Image (cartoon, rainbow, N blue to C red):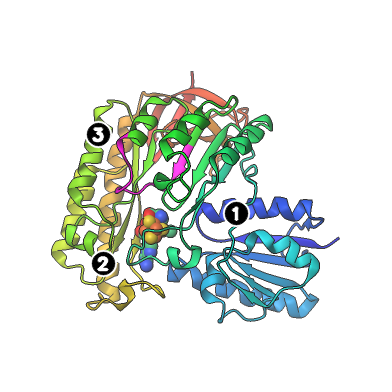
Amino acid sequence: MKKYYIETYGCQMNVSLSDQLQEKMNTSGFVLADSQEDADIVIINACSVREHAERKVFNRLEYLSYLKKQKGLKIVVTGCFAQNQKHNIKNADYILGTYKLSLIPEILKNGKENLINVEFDEYRFLEPVRNSTYPFQSLVDITVGCNNFCTYCIVPYLRGPQISRRSIEIIENIKRLADNGVVEIFLLGQNVNTYGKDNSDICFAELLYKIHQIDGIKRIKFLTSHPKDFNDEIIDAVFTLPKVSRWIHLPIQSGSDRILKLMNRKYDVNHYLKIVERLNSYKKEYNLSTDFLVGFPGETEQDFEETINIAKSIKFDEAFMFKYSDRPYTASATFPAKLPEEVKNKRLELLIKIQREIEKEKIKSHKNKIRDVLIESQSKRNLEDAMGRDEINKVVIIKNKKLQQGNFYKVKIVEAKGITLIGELL
Ligand code: SAM
Ligand code: SF4
């Protein structure tokens, strides 16, 4: 029996797809190896959203090429990276695009496939499985692809148009996962808010209500939302369904209307502020995180200042901050007025500094609050402590090593250290 190993780079979507692929490899007669060195086949499932991430994968491939020469390892490259870099990948046995990932076990078994296959034909979903790191959780890809064409983004070109998994299938899958001990469902898609629009299925809010009814499921999270589609029904579901985590990841990208227009985001700052107002109207705690993209072509000092101002006024609980880089196929790659690297770096550094200060200040407000913490693992810093997440997805450290992974505990937040909460069992 052939031994395989999967290396995953990139977002939660890739983690989810690798977990599903792993299950399919196992049921197709392959055996999971302990390491790359111990494997006959290494599958690289990697991301191409940012240039920096791609460089890392190319370095990795060099090492695997060395192993291939040493011991005849088979190398399969898949995901956005394969789709994008198909002609630049050396020494791979198969370069299989995003629509071909689910076929890898079959391809490896019958060996009848071209070196490169990145066709967009029929997309086949794999069955959602338990998360390989956190078996109490399942990452469920409810949509793939994206129709939005933000001008900086390569995703629509590498993952094709949005395709939603059928809701009947999602519900059946989640029931089965719940029967097997999964308590937390993490719904994934590039823009989950438009779930069901491509195939006239139920809408995202309805999907949340249906999943909420499934016995055994205790927490539901989702990623990513888009401000143009994050509507009142969805907000209402988040604040009224107790199992739905009140963690909202809503990328704003920029605080300048001019830049948002150039990005083709289809909302303005005022629309985003109205959403925040609506979130506040429920008078319940919530966690708002975002993405910022700085240094977009043509971003002036004034535009950047507007981004800083919006960060300061909204005070996001968390933010992922990126420096713009040109990506192939995208509209913005052809835009004039590209900014010098040092300007982009300086702006990113300043935004990170300001955002981190906001986070440090904001985290203090959690002190003395009572939270339901789902234990994920031991703390990375101290193996005597447990690490979990509460109902608004905040990381909480609890000084108690007896707590069980996958169980919920009522906890009082006693301290905020840096950006981490420390809790005590009630
Ligand atoms: N669909 C999600 C959304 O709309 O936010 C996630 C898209 S993307 C995979 C995640 C983040 O990467 C984006 O929010 C954006 O900030 C960043 N990103 C996308 N393209 C980029 C580029 N060309 N350069 C730098 N960052 C980029
Ligand atoms: Fe990319 Fe925009 Fe689609 Fe997100 S919504 S994946 S940023 S095109």
Q: Which percent across, then down, holds residue 183? A: 58, 31
Residue 323 falls in which quadrant of the image?
bottom left
Crowd class of label 1 (few under 14; some 14 to 19; many from 20; radius 10 Å): many
Crowd class of label 2 (few under 14; some 14 to 19; many from 20; radius 10 Å): some
Give ligand 1's quarter of the image: bottom left
Question: Which of 298/153 is in front?
Answer: 153
* Residue drawn at the location 24% of the way across and 28% of the way down: 281
Q: Earlier in the sequence, mark 3 or mark 1?
A: 1
Question: Which of 170/178 is in front?
Answer: 170
Question: Which of 216/170 is in front?
Answer: 170
Residue that label 1 marks: 17
The residue segment tinted magenta is: 221-232
Residue that label 3 marks: 278
Q: Nearer the viewer, mark 3 or mark 2?
A: 3
Image: 317 above or below 151: above
Q: Earlier in the sequence, mark 3 or mark 2?
A: 3
Residue that label 2 marks: 346
* Residue 426 seen in render: yes
Amino acid type of the residue that numbered disc 3 sits on in the rendered structure: Arg
SS assignment at label 1: helix
Question: Which of 179/43 is in front?
Answer: 179
10 vs 261, left or right, is right
Amino acid type of the residue that numbered disc 2 sits on in the rendered structure: Lys
Crowd class of label 3 (few under 14; some 14 to 19; many from 20; radius 10 Å): some
Q: Which percent across, then down, holds residue 282? A: 28, 27
SS assignment at label 3: helix
Marks 3/1: CA–CA distance = 34 Å
Image: 202 above or below 407: below
SS assignment at label 2: helix
56 vs 50, left or right, is right
Q: Which percent across, then down, holds residue 197? A: 42, 47
Image: 304 above or below 369: below
